[in-house]
Image (spheres, rainbow, N blue to C red):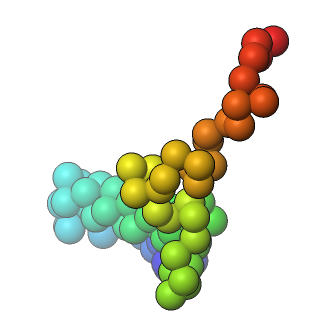
């Protein structure tokens, strides 16, 4: 993608650009840059998709479905006190 764009930019002439149309040429370059940006983002920035396991983890269970004693954020009565 980027190699082809670089080649095109290096070897295009002003005459070629005006024959194609300046506005159309710049729109095409912009569209190609967006494609390159999207490819870079999906390769290096987007989180990889993982297969969900068939077993539900405790974190996958909605909090309202857990009993109070099973809730991971629920503190035992002995732990209740100031949090400083």
**x and y percent of residue 73 in the render?**
61, 41
Residue extending farthest to the bottom is 54
- Locate the C terminus and report the quarter of the image it occupies: top right
Between 11 and 51, the one lying in front of the other is 51
The picture quadrant where one finds residue 19 is bottom left
Between 66 and 52, the one lying in front of the other is 66
**x and y percent of residue 83 in the render?**
76, 16
Which residue is located at x 30 percent, y 69 percent?
A: 16
Residue 51 in view = no
Which residue is located at x 56 percent, y 60 percent?
A: 59
Which residue is located at x 49 percent, y 53 percent?
A: 67
**x and y percent of residue 51 in the render?**
53, 84
Which residue is located at x 59 percent, y 54 percent?
A: 70
Between 20 and 27, the one lying in front of the other is 27
Q: Indicate left or right for 19 with 63 as reference.
A: left
Looking at the rendered structure, the number of numbered marks drawn on it comes to 0
């Amino acid at each position: 993608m980027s190699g082809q764009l670089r080649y095109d930019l290096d070897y295009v002439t002003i005459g070629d650009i005006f024959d194609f149309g300046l506005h159309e040429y710049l729109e095409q370059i912009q569209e190609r840059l967006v494609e390159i940006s999207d490819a870079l983002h999906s390769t290096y920035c987007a989180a990889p998709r993982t297969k969900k396991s068939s077993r539900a983890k405790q974190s996958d269970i909605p909090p309202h479905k857990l009993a109070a004693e099973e809730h991971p954020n629920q503190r035992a009565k002995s732990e209740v006190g100031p949090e400083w």
